[in-house]
Amino acid sequence: MRTTLTLDEDVAHRLGELTRLTGASFKQVVNETLRAGLQVSDKPANPLPPFQVTPKAGGFRRGVDVRRLNQLNDELESEQLLDKLTGSMDAR
């Protein structure tokens, strides 16, 4: 089968090297390389060991009141909005 194929420079360079080293034609080198790559992909991958999660205690630093986190978030959002609004008015 005849087809047109655009190769990345590094791949074309490596195939050219193999052509020079083996004395085979470029077509033969491309076909053999593709066959080798396709055979590897036919084999199933080795099973991976089961993934295990090691839990660690989380928590907050001393002095952080977890009951007030939403309030802190609201205050930060309000400050960002205020900075955005005053910044856009200064541009006028």
Image (cartoon, rainbow, N blue to C red):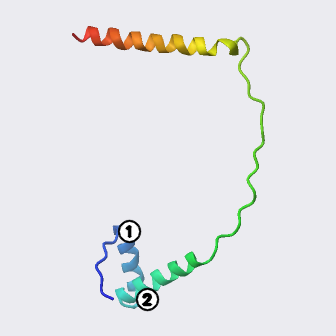
Mark 1 near mark 2, Cβ–Cβ under 8 Å? Answer: no
Q: Is residue 78 left or right of residue 41?
A: left
Q: Quadrant of the C terminus?
A: top left
Q: Amino acid at mark 1?
A: Asp
Mark 1 surroundings: few (<14), some (14-19) or many (≥20) residues within 10 A: few
- Tag of residue 22: 2
Closer-to-camera residue (55/15): 55
Q: Position of residue 48 (x, y in %)?
A: 71, 62
Q: Is residue 49 above or below residue 28?
A: above
Q: Is residue 17 above or below residue 53?
A: below
The mark lying in front, picked from 1 and 2, is 1
Q: Quadrant of residue 56?
A: top right
Q: Residue at x 40, y 83 (%)?
A: 30
Q: Residue at x 78, y 38 (%)?
A: 55
- Tag of residue 10: 1
Q: Position of residue 37 (x, y in %)?
A: 51, 78
Mark 2 surroundings: few (<14), some (14-19) or many (≥20) residues within 10 A: few
